[in-house]
């Protein structure tokens, strides 16, 4: 048996989640069964999609049960293995949940090479968020050199990779982020052509800012947020534009939903400008993970794609960090350091 | 000089158009210049898109000017020609506008073969509406046998062809139309698997009707109307469904816009079910007209694709017929008989 601490869903949120929705529990894990491994979590990933799992609503995945461990991916060290592919000491990424230790099916875990990059990147730029960026840009939006793209949540784990990949491919990149510091970072460190602060503008002013930053119009809007940013981008969309719909964090907890724009104006823009709006979920694209890693890992190693992490210390601080992230309080990929990293990253 | 009667836009409508927005004028056409032909209009086409041209709003085409002739396509007889490709007596289709006679660039007119089918079909099943149906189904929705499709405005010029083509291809076809008579026609004459009356149901009941008519869910929603029908279809959409967005007649004159559904619920459905919504305009697809005609003309000749026409008599009745059509008062392709048809159809 292995002692284990975990964060469970204490109750479903009503609108905006609070710390009361979570509870820290202690328990024990049984020894691994045939084909299983026991993992000591080092890094836990916090991602906007987790907000959806807290609700009891039909979605692409089952909701977390009340009393159940919060779902999520983590990077950890194998401490016991009954799977032939893993030995203690291996570093893996898998669906550990918000927990200090997890029992995983070996078949569901993926080995992480600590020589490739800091192991935390397997949850960010070289993990699900980076892969999401790559799929949305290539497979969904089918970005072409010379086009202009607007990226919302521009300094987040997904948006920052979208913008940098697009820039490397010869697109004009306009970010939208919350706050002057993030915008400066996007322009100066990530190489975006421009980045607009949605906190400093209403939808109309933001629309005008986008018009000036992309004077030839917008060919791709990489949608992570919904809300005011969507409203501001729409009038700037070019004929035959594409909107890969990846997330809508502004609306996840119900704020702004009741007075959001109505469908007719959106529908008219899609029709008149012949736009393509396409929702996608990264789980449908596992087949391309290898191609993604092959392309992007070298770019990260050479520093041509940069990343930034927000680290919360200790599993017990995961709820607070998660709530902050939902309000845009993170800066880059949000992680929780759950245990010591043997690689020292 | 040729005497000419025409319907002009007297004033822009405020919301729902009325007969006062139109005016009949008499005038004269000059003789054709080099490369031009003079056409005597026989059949005028009335189409929902014309509603958009009456507004002074940015769209894919310029609005009709106040005092200008209402735009539209007509089939007519060449009565004078200074274009080598046409001689008097030829039947052509072109953008005559709402007028008894028109001066057209020969290069913009297309000859119609009266032996192929009644010449009025060049405005319907074998013209722009039929081509629109074909493009939306094949190129935009990429329909596959075994899928289920919902078609709104199911007995209209576009919807009736969408449903019949889909049925011939092995899709399950559910129509939505206004009134029991149209629904009966769609099921009994057009061979739809089911057709639901949107006048007899609110959005919730309509959604339940669609659920029963397409128990495996809906893979394609061919969107012609917006409004309540869109709301009813959305909860029935299957993962990876497609919505070719062809029109939104329910919202063209502003009715229902102020209390239409808001974007967040739509956005969530698109994201969670990974839908693809794509606007399209037939003018972008001229290159495929030949392929369309080659496939569909024989089907019409063999009676495997049926069509129905609503005919208004006389140019002066075009406004009234147009207003009626916007409220769904037509039954099949809406035409105006502007002058005698030499083929007697």
Image: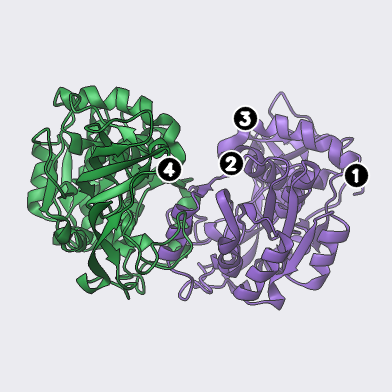
Chain colours: A green, B purple
Residue highlighted by disc 1 = B303
Secondary structure of the residue carrying numbered label 2:
helix
CA neighbours of label 1 inside 10 A, class few (<14), some (14 to 19), many (20+)? few
Which dot marks residue A167?
none
Measured Cα–Cα span from mark 4 to mark 3: 37 Å
Q: Chain of mark 2?
A: B
Q: Chain of mark 1?
A: B
Residue at 65% from the left image edge and 75% from the top image edge: B205
Residue at 24% from the left image edge and 31% from the top image edge: A90
Asked if the residue under mark 3 is in contact with the one under mark 4, i.e. CB atoms within 8 Å, the reply is no
Residue B286 percent coordinates (x, y):
62, 34
Secondary structure of the residue carrying numbered label 4:
helix
In the picture provided, is A336 more to the left or to the right than B11?
A: left
Residue highlighted by disc 2 = B140
Which image quadrant for residue A70?
bottom left
Measured Cα–Cα span from mark 4 to mark 1: 46 Å
Depicted B340 relative to depicted A169: above or below: below
Residue highlighted by disc 4 = A283
In the picture provided, is A331 more to the left or to the right than B22?
A: left
């Amino acid at each position: 048996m292995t002692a284990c601490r975990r964060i469970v869903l204490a109750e479903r949120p009503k609108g905006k989640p609070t710390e009361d929705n979570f509870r820290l529990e202690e328990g024990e894990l049984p020894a691994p069964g045939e084909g299983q491994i026991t993992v000591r979590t080092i890094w836990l990933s916090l991602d906007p999609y987790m907000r959806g799992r807290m609700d009891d609503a039909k979605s692409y995945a089952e909701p977390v049960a009340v009393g159940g461990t919060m779902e999520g991916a983590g990077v950890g060290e194998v401490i016991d293995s009954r799977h032939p592919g893993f030995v203690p000491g291996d570093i893996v990424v898998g669906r550990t949940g918000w927990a200090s230790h997890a029992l995983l099916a070996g078949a569901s875990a993926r080995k992480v090479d600590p020589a490739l990059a800091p192991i935390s990147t397997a949850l960010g730029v070289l993990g699900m968020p980076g892969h999401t960026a790559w799929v949305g840009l290539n497979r969904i939006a089918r970005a072409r050199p010379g086009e202009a793209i607007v990226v919302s949540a521009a300094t987040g784990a997904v948006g920052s990779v979208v913008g940098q990949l697009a820039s490397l491919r010869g697109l004009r990149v306009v970010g939208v982020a919350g706050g002057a510091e993030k915008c400066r970072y996007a322009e100066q460190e990530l190489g975006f052509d421009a980045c607009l602060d949605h906190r400093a503008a209403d939808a109309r002013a933001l629309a005008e800012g986008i018009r000036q930053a992309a004077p030839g119009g917008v060919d791709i809007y990489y949608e992570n947020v919904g809300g005011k940013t969507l409203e501001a981008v729409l009038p700037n969309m070019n004929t035959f534009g594409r909107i890969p719909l990846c997330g809508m964090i502004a609306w996840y907890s119900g704020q702004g939903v009741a007075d959001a724009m109505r469908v007719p104006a959106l529908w008219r823009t899609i029709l008149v400008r012949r736009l393509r709006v396409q929702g996608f979920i990264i789980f449908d694209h596992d087949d391309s993970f290898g191609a993604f890693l092959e392309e992007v890992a070298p770019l990260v190693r050479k520093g041509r794609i940069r990343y930034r992490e927000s680290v919360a210390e200790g599993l017990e601080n995961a709820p607070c960090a998660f709530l902050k992230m939902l309000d845009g309080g993170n800066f880059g990929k949000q992680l929780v350091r759950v245990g010591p990293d043997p690689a020292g990253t």
